[in-house]
Amino acid sequence: MNKRVLKILCTPEPAFLLPGIPPVAIGTALGVKAAGELNLLLSCLAVLSIICINAGSNMLNDYFDHLSGNDWLNTNRTVFGGGSGYIQDGIISPEQMRTAGMLALGAGAAIGLLIVIISASPFILILGIIGVLAGILWTLPPFSFCYRCPGEGYIFTVFGILPTAGAYYLQTGRLAWEIAPPAVITGLLIAGTALLNSIPDTEADMAAGKKTFPAVFGIKKAVMLYRALVILSYITALLSLLIAESFENGAVFYLFVSPLGAACIISASQKRLSEKGVNLPNALNIAHYVCMAAAVTVGIAVS
């Protein structure tokens, strides 16, 4: 394959773009149920925008982790974390990675602006600004939030709650209590995904001064938090059966995925995650997250 084509295909790390889709899918499904019709154009544009923002954020993270030495120190890179390694492997230059990241964020912002124009919504404009700034400030000095404190709450809000609520708003033109349970479930699981994927990077993060949860509190407590986030997602689903009638089917369908959730909890042991080259917990977690999104979306659609 031509080297230039390889660079273009590799730079955005396609596997890391998928977590942005479930919040939009779930929010859209619940919004369509409430509105009685689907605005396909706005839905598609929302997916494209969040994919571009996630891509830009990931690429800038690679660039700044290169500058800090973090990715160079990481000897336990996996397919789920530790950076893409494209800079370290000489596939792409740091400057190209930075430019690609900014272009991706710019594309996400441009699509977001088109959504604002079509929807004529100040609320969507505010969400778009937050999303782009979140992608930039996550790693951009002197802010570098990911180097200053554990980011699970940040990820829970910016990549879970906001896109789910935003997708619902695009279909209905309003916000409602019914979006809270699926938004919380999505936020908990995407925060758990980020937490779990950061565990193999603990040694490199500590050496580079990157204050992820495992680097600050240790792997044992990180495992406990991950398990708690998964369990809380199911508790949220159970509670929503009592307080969110419109989400009832989505919650029930998610409960059907609980055996996979239990597998995630069991596999995410301190011993297993402390071993180099072990990807089973991360793979199960991704499968659980995807199955949650599919089950919830289908459950909402058939209700």
Image (spheres, helix red, strand yellow):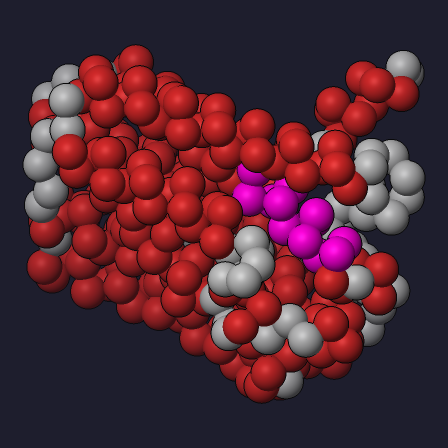
- Describe residue 107's horizontal placement relative to residue 301 as left or right: right
At x 48%, y 24%, the residue is 107
Question: Which secondary structure type mostly characterizes the magenta part of the structure?
Answer: helix
Q: Tell which of 36 and 131 is nearer to you.
A: 131
Q: Tell which of 4 and 229 is nearer to you.
A: 4
For the record, the magenta segment spans 55-67
Q: Position of residue 276 (x, y in %)?
A: 84, 68
Q: Position of residue 237 (x, y in %)?
A: 27, 59
Q: Tell which of 63 and 17 is nearer to you.
A: 63
Quadrant of image for the N terminus: top right
- Describe residue 162's horizontal placement relative to residue 213 as left or right: left
Magenta stretch contains residue 197: no
Magenta stretch contains residue 65: yes
At x 29%, y 68%, the residue is 235
Determine which quarter of the picture holds residue 263: bottom right
Q: Position of residue 29 (x, y in %)?
A: 26, 31
Quadrant of image for the C terminus: top left
Q: Position of residue 95 (x, y in %)?
A: 75, 37
